[in-house]
Amino acid sequence: MPTGHRGPDASRVRAVTETVAPESASRTALEQEVGQQIAALHNAAKHAITRMSHRVHPELQPVGFGLLRVVLGQDAGTRAADLCAQLGIDKGAISRQVTQLKELGLVETAPDPADGRASLITATPAARAAVDAARADIRLDYARVFEGWDERELADFARLLERFVEASLSVDLAR
C-alpha cells in the first residue's frame, strides 16, 4: 500500500494481521479481506464503466459501450456474428445493441463485400472522437487515484494485479 495512503479498510487489515496468532488463521483472514476488496473494486469498476459510457453518450449503456469498444478495434468493420462470438452475447442482444448504437450515431452498417447476406458494423468518426475524449478523462482520473504513489509502488501494484488476474483465470472462483 502506498506510503501515507490507507484504504477504507486498512485498519481492519492491520487488526487482523496483529491479532490473529496462527499463520493459517491470519492468512485466511487476509484472503477474506482481499476478497472483500476485490468485490469493492468490482463495484468501482462497474461504476467507472457506466461513467465512461455516459461520457461517450448520455444514453449509452455499459453493454453497448463494451460492444462499441470491440467495434472500434476493427478498422475494417465487424459482422454481428463475430461480435456474438467475441462477447458471448446472443444474436438478438447484439442486434438490439447495434440498433441503439446506430440511433445514437455511434456505429454505421454497410453490406459486407465478402458476404452479401451480412453487414459490417463500423464506428463513426463521432464515436471515435467521443471514446478518445472519454479515455483521456479516464487517464486523468487514474492520475489522481495514483497521485501519492511512487513508481515502485505503482509497478508493484501492476505486477501483483497481473499475477492475481492470471491466477484467477485458471481457477473457478465461483465454486
Image (cartoon, rainbow, N blue to C red):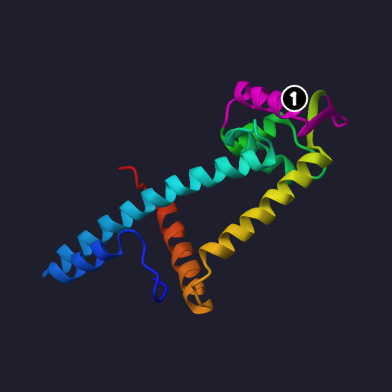
Residue at horizontal 32%, vertical 53%?
35
Q: Amino acid at mark 1?
A: Glu
**Residue 106 image point, x, y percent:** 76, 34
Quarter of the image where one finds residue 105: top right
**Residue 34 image point, x, y percent:** 32, 58
Residue at horizontal 26%, vertical 65%?
11
For the question of whether residue 144 can be seen, the reply is yes
**Residue 120 image point, x, y percent:** 80, 32
Give the magenta part as a residue range.
Answer: 89-116
Can you say which quadrant of the picture contains the C terminus? top left
For the question of whether residue 74 can be seen, the reply is no
Q: Judge whether 57 appears above or below 160 on screen.
A: above
Q: Nearer the viewer, residue 92 or 156?
A: 156
**Magenta stretch containing residue 137, yes or no?**
no
Q: Judge whether 167 appears above or below 56 on screen.
A: below
**Magenta stretch containing residue 92, yes or no?**
yes
Residue at horizontal 56%, vertical 34%?
88
Q: Which residue is mark 1?
A: 103
**Residue 19 image point, x, y percent:** 13, 68
